[in-house]
Every structure is written in structure tokens, then in C-alpha cells.
Amino acid sequence: MGRTARNTDRAGTLTGGPGPFIVGILNVTPDSFSDGGDFLDPEAAAEHAATMLDEGADVLDVGGESTRPGSDPVSQEEEIRRVVPVLERILSVRPEAVISVDTYRAGTATAALEVGASLVNDVTALRDDPRMVYVIEEAACPVILMHMQGEPKTMQKEPHYQDVVREVSDFLAERAEYAVAAGVRPENIIVDPGIGFGKNLEHNLALLRNLDAIVDLGFPVLIGASRKSFIERITGVQEARDRVSGTVATTVLAYERGATFFRVHDVRANREALAVAEAVLHTPRR
Ligand code: HH2
């Protein structure tokens, strides 16, 4: 059995579990909104990866392109050039790491799976690259399907919905159906409402408030609210790195509403908050 098969099996066990699971963010980009430029060097990236694993991350999500509002895409070659050496370095020092690759390009996903990534995080929910669904099907690996209105360059200009909760849950149901029709196993699907992706403050809050509509689709739900600007709109905290408390609040509330995967920068704070939330929510009543 090759390394790819071994690693994807491991991720499958994870998605079948009850959670909660922490997905630690590792952006190998010069321009990500909160940690851009910090981890471009594979050595620095591997060190940060090890810290996040030690702090309790279950998965590391490695991305080579920023999708922050207004960002420009990079080429597939550049994305692979950023991501692959980092994956190799992390797995050489922490071979047990479960790594997700944050990409919507089939070529990047293939290259990452070949060097030992275990799952794919596609912010376009398999819409951008028609070959992506077949990469997922063949690797038999978990995939995160995320909702986004528009594209990163323009998505925050004027997001508009009649009924954001219904439209996002219908979209995720349709994308999951598409994946299953192409041979992706339903148990390998994780869905994500895409906090901040073509959504204003009210849209984000409506989705968090009514998360049960997405949980009811029957797939594990991932929330990626970490340090995002809607937290600044509420709290006034301008520096992205300082939005930890606001992030933790979304993690705990989303966990209570049924989400089980949390994509975060600050692993320790979110892990501790989830431990307390789990203890409170799961203690049997007398
Ligand atoms: N958010 C970002 C990137 N990838 N993937 C999923 N599934 N869900 C998310 O909410 C999500 C995501 C944006 O955050 P970040 O990676 O911190 O910033 P940037 O895109 O600037 O690299």
C-alpha cells in the first residue's frame, strides 16, 4: 500500500468519527489576510505545523493561494511549488500528520496527494476544475465542499441572496449529489457554508444562527470563521491576529449547533474552548 492510500484511509477514519476536529490553517502564501508571508519557507512552515499538532490540531490545511476578498489567483505551477515542499517537510518530521490541501485545482490536489496529503479542501465545491471530482473519486479521499458566491476578486462587492440559509444549503446538497454521482463516497463528504465568501455580516450571522439547516443535510459540517472580518465588524478588533476571542465564540456556538470541524489559526484557544463545550454539552443529565 502506497503512502497516499495509507494517508487517505487515516483521514476517512477521522471524518467518520464524532469530533470535534480542529483543522489548523497553514497558509504558504505571501498575501493571506492574517498570516501572509509567515510560512513561505518550508522550515518555518513545518515548525508551525508541529506547534499546531502539539496544540491539538487533528488536521493541517495547507494552502498555496490566498482566497481573501480582492485576491488574485496564482498559477498551478506556483501553487504546487509552494505547497509540495512544505508537505514533504512536515511529513518527514511528523509522518502521522493528516494534511488537507486547500486547492481547487486538480493538478495541485494530485501533486499533494502523491506526496502524502490525505484530503482536499475545495473552496469552489468542485466547480472550478472539472477534473477535480475524478481526482477525489480515484484517491477515495475526503473532500470539503464549500459555498462561495462569486469569486474572491469581487465576492464582497455586493453579495445578495433572497434567503441565504436556503440557498447555501441547497447549493451544498446539489454539490454533494454531483460528487456522489461521479463516484465519491458520501462518507467522504464534508460541507462548509463558506463564512465570508460572498457574504455580508447579516449573511454570516444568519448562517451561524441557522446552522441546523446545513447540519440536516447529513454530512459533517466545517466552519471557517477564524479571524475573519465579520468579527471585526462586531467587536471592532482591527488586527486580524487579535480576533481570537471572537473566533472562539463562533467555534463554541457552531459546535453546539452541530458543526464538527473547525478551521482555525489559533489551535490552542479553540481546542481548549471545545474541551469545555464538550464537557458541558455531553455530561449526562441526572
Ligand atoms: N477560508 C479561507 C480559506 N479556505 N476553506 C474552507 N473550507 N472554509 C473557509 O472558511 C476557508 C477556506 C480564508 O481564510 P485564510 O486561509 O485564513 O486566508 P487566505 O484565503 O487569505 O489565505
Image (cartoon, rainbow, N blue to C red):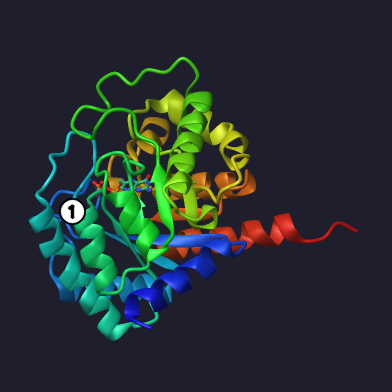
Task: State whether residue 203 is above or below residue 226.
Answer: above
- Please say whether residue 241 is visible from this viewpoint: no
The extreme top residue here reads 162
The extreme right residue here reads 286
Residue 42 locus on image (x, y percent): 16, 72
Which residue is located at x 15 percent, y 49 percent? 31
- Please say whether residue 18 is visible from this viewpoint: yes
Hey, which quadrant is residue 117 in on the image?
bottom left
10 Å neighbourhood of mark 1: few (<14), some, or many (≥20)?
some
Q: In what quadrant of the picture does the C terminus appear? A: bottom right
Hey, which quadrant is residue 70 in on the image?
top left
Q: Which residue is mark 1?
A: 36
Residue 169 locus on image (x, y percent): 51, 32
Q: Which of these two is toward me, 147 or 69? A: 147
Which residue is located at x 25 percent, y 71 percent? 114
Which residue is located at x 44 percent, y 53 percent? 183
Question: How many numbered marks appear?
Answer: 1
User: Callout 1, which amino acid?
Assistant: Gly
Task: State whether residue 150 is above or below residue 114.
Answer: above
Q: Which of these two is toward me, 282 or 222? A: 222
Left or right: 285 as drawn, with respect to 173 = right
Task: State whether residue 190 is above or below residue 90.
Answer: above
Q: Can you tell me whether the CB of the residue at mark 1 lies under 8 Å from the nearest atom of ligand 1?
A: yes
Q: In what quadrant of the picture does the N terminus appear? A: bottom left
Left or right: 62 as drawn, with respect to 180 = left
Q: Which of these two is toward me, 81 or 268? A: 81
Residue 33 locus on image (x, y percent): 23, 46
Residue 223 locus on image (x, y percent): 46, 46
Which residue is located at x 19 percent, y 64 percent? 83
SS at badge 1: loop
